[in-house]
């Protein structure tokens, strides 16, 4: 497995941090842009699906990403901690929060809450991923533990 980690700069109201494990060398997941014009600030943060240097997701690959968002509007910690271990079967097709090109398998995602912190755990499974790779991915998901923020 290859590891990639990136985050948005902490200069705004929101910081996104991610770590990705993949069976190929994934490119940077978090992309940011800040511009200043006429006294106004225009900024965006995008979370991109894992792709290789050619911009593709290898058909026989699998990937796991954990995102954490800090900042933004205040939220009262009313959710209970997510029960562990996680099961890959509990993941559901993801919404549009992660920029995913058409050539990348549709991500499956699961929200996790731990000690008031919120995480998104996302997996991608290539259409030709082996049974062994799928089993290893399921085992990684089941082994996830979250430290206090």
Image: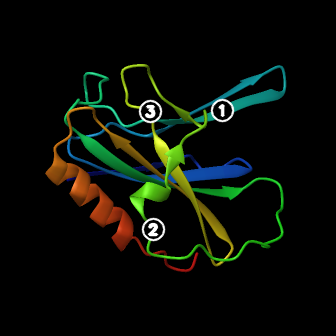
Q: Nearer the viewer, mark 3 or mark 1?
A: 3
Which secondary structure lies at badge 2?
loop
* Residue located at (25% from left, 27% from top): 53
Camera-side residue: 82 or 28?
A: 82
Whether residue 10 is visible to the viewer of this picture, yes or no, is: no
Q: Are marks 3 and 2 in contact (CB under 8 Å)?
A: no
Give the image location of residue 18, x and y in percent. Answer: 47, 52
Which secondary structure lies at badge 1?
strand
Could you classify mark 3 by the number of other residues whose Cα lies within 10 Å: few (under 14), some (14-19), or many (20 or more)? some
- Residue tagged 1: 44
Marks 3 and 2, Cα distance to the nearest angstrom?
20 Å
Could you classify mark 2 by the number of other residues whose Cα lies within 10 Å: few (under 14), some (14-19), or many (20 or more)? many
Give the image location of residue 45, x and y in percent. Answer: 61, 37
Q: Nearer the viewer, mark 1 or mark 2?
A: 2
- Residue tagged 2: 86
Marks 3 and 1, Cα distance to the nearest angstrom?
23 Å
* Relative horizontal placement of residue 70, taking residue 120 as reference (left or right): right
Q: Which label number is shown at residue 106?
A: 3
* Residue located at (56% from left, 46% from top): 8
Q: Which label number is shown at residue 126?
A: none
Which of marks 1 and 3 precedes in the sequence?
1
């Amino acid at each position: 497995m290859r590891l990639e980690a990136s985050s948005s700069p902490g200069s705004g109201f929101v910081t996104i941090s991610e770590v990705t494990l993949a069976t190929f060398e994934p490119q940077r997941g978090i992309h940011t842009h800040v511009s200043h014009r006429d006294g106004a600030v225009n900024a965006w943060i995008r979370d991109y699906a894992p792709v290789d240097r050619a911009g593709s997701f290898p058909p026989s690959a699998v990937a796991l990403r954990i995102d954490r968002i800090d900042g933004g509007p205040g939220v009262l910690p009313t959710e209970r901690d997510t029960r562990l271990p996680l099961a890959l079967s509990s993941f559901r097709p993801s919404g549009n929060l992660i920029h995913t090109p058409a050539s990348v398998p549709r991500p499956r995602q699961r929200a996790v809450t731990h000690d008031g912190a919120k995480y998104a755990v996302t997996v991608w499974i290539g259409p030709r991923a082996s049974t062994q790779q799928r089993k290893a991915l399921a085992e990684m998901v089941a082994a996830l533990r979250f430290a206090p923020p």
